[in-house]
Each structure stands twice: as C-alpha cells, then as structure tokens.
Image: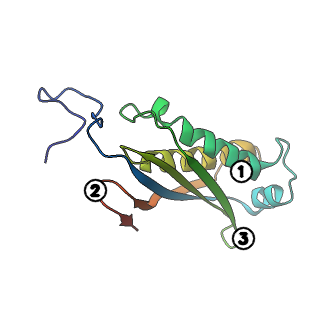
Amino acid sequence: MNLTHLDENQRPKMVDVSDKTQTTRVAVASGIIEMSQDAYNAIVTNATKKGPVLQTAVIAAIMGAKKTSELIPMCHPLNLSGINCDVEELPELPGFKLTLTAKLTGQTGVEMEALTGTSIGLLTIYDMVKAIDKGMIIRNVQLETKAGGKSGDYKR
C-alpha cells in the first residue's frame, strides 16, 4: 500500500488535490468526557468560576475545526461551509458527549476537521473544570460518519 503523504523518495508531502472533482463532503465526529458528580453538577448549574462551560466548549470546537490545517501538518486549509456542534448531557456517567458536524463543497474531506473540533471542545470542558476534577477522562473521540469524495461514504 502506498501512503499518499510520502513522495517517491519517502519524504513527507501534502497531497495534491487540484485534479479532484469538487463534491459536497460532510463528516461527523463525537467524543465523551467523563467526570466526577461535583464537576458535572457545576457545569449543568453554571456554577463554575470560568463561566458557561458548554457554550464555551461549542465555540472552541468550531474554532478548532476551522484551525485544523494549522495543527495537523498535512491537512489542507479548507473553506468550510458549515460547522455544527452539539453537547449532550450524560448524567448516568456523569459526563457529556460532544458531536461536531463539518461540511464543505471541495476537493478533500472534512474528517480531520470534525475530529479536531471534537477534541478541542472536549479539552475546553476539561480546562474549564479541572480545578474541580483533574481525573476527568476524554474517550471515544471517533469518526461517526462521512459522506462524499472518492473513497465513498462511511458509517460507524
């Protein structure tokens, strides 16, 4: 199997997508953060010292998706046409599930943008409540679905 991010001399390169057809591409990623009951309660009651945690995490997730090419060396800078982020309360853990959808019409996929945005959103939650619980666990950051492009659709 040939890796697309290596040239004929095995040097790293960014893949040339200029000959690829523009198509609508959508990717959805999600992840979970598990925490103590005290941290969970502080978030859902807006009782943290750093402000509204979930709203801040959504903004951070969107910013993270937009800045993916600055963080992941071989990612193309993309003109995303839409980013949506949702945070679901999981009181039984306790914790939260963050889901991010990234969309564009272009020549390369948006999986990395969805995964990066999800990770940044979850890390923001951690940052904002680490004074209450340093033992939080971020897990299951994963691609849920992707649509569009030459490699076809994917559903977990």
Q: Give the residue furthest to the bottom.
A: 92
Q: How far apart are the two marked residues, 1 and 3, measured between alpha carbons? A: 16 Å
Frontmost of labels 3 and 2 is 2
Q: Residue tagged by mark 2?
A: 151
Indicate which disc, 1 or 2, sits on the residue closer to the N terminus. Answer: 1
Q: Callout 1 environment at 10 Å: few (<14), some (14 to 19), or many (20+)?
A: some
Q: Amino acid at mark 1?
A: Asp
Query: Which residue is at 35% across, 33% downward?
Result: 74
Q: Which residue is mark 3?
A: 91
Taking the image as shown, residue 47 lies to the left or right of residue 24, namely: right
Describe residue 30's horizontal placement relative to residue 2 as left or right: right
Is there CB contact under 8 Å for labels 1 and 3? Answer: no
At horizontal 28% and vertical 54% (from top left) the residue drawn is: 150
Quadrant of residue 156 within the rendered picture:
bottom left
Q: Amino acid at mark 2?
A: Ser
The image's mark for residue 42 is none
Q: Which mark is residue 133?
A: 1
Secondary-structure class at tag 1: loop
